[in-house]
Image (cartoon, rainbow, N blue to C red):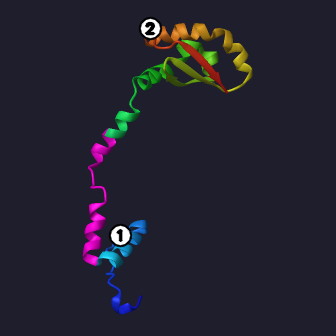
Amino acid sequence: MNKENNNSAPLPPRQLGKRRNRYAMLAQWYGPERAAVEISAHTCQPRKIDFLLEDILVKIRRPENGVLLTLRSKWSEIVGSMFAKFTEAESLKDGILTLKVRHSALLVELKPSCDLIVKRVNEVVGENTCSSVQLRV
């Protein structure tokens, strides 16, 4: 292609990366005016940030997260101060409380107490919130 037939116009400053390549290709195919129209026709329209954040928060907001915060604040009451130093309520999903244990030797100590932990958790945060406990190192 020689320079006389080159219809490409200088790229607008907002055209970056892949978009710049598409613009250059479309400018050669359609001409610079039509290329800009084609780019804008196939580009997502801007959205306000509060709408984006609301969509994200709806996806991550779960009632179990509030319960988990309550558990963490009252953890020493539930398991006792000795075990509270070495364990942490990591997640609560579908009634299964996952406890992070800092040392594998504590798994042997805590395993028989899982039913008691479930009972105490349900006393603190409400009946039928927790159905079982899963331990992990």
For the point 71% across and 14% down, which residue is it? 109
- Against 25, residue 135 (above or below) is above
For the point 35% across and 34% down, which residue is it? 58
Mark number displayed over residue 15: 1
Decide: few, some or many residues near mark 1? Use Cα within 10 Å; few <14, some 14-19, many ≥20: some
Seen from the viewer's position, the closer of residues 134 and 107 is 134
As measured in the structure, the alpha-carbon distance from the residue carrying label 1 to the one carrying label 2 is 57 Å
- Against 123, residue 34 (above or below) is below
Seen from the viewer's position, the closer of residues 72 and 52 is 52
Q: Position of residue 64 (x, y in %)?
A: 43, 23
39 drawn magenta:
yes
**Which element type, helix, strand or loop, lies under badge 1?**
loop
Seen from the viewer's position, the closer of residues 1 and 114 is 1
**Which element type, helix, strand or loop, lies under badge 2?**
loop
Q: Which residues are magenta?
A: 32-54
Q: Quadrant of residue 89?
A: top right
Seen from the viewer's position, the closer of residues 63 and 7 is 7
- Against 65, residue 120 (above or below) is above
**What residue is shown with label 2?**
127
Q: Position of residue 99 (x, y in %)?
A: 59, 22
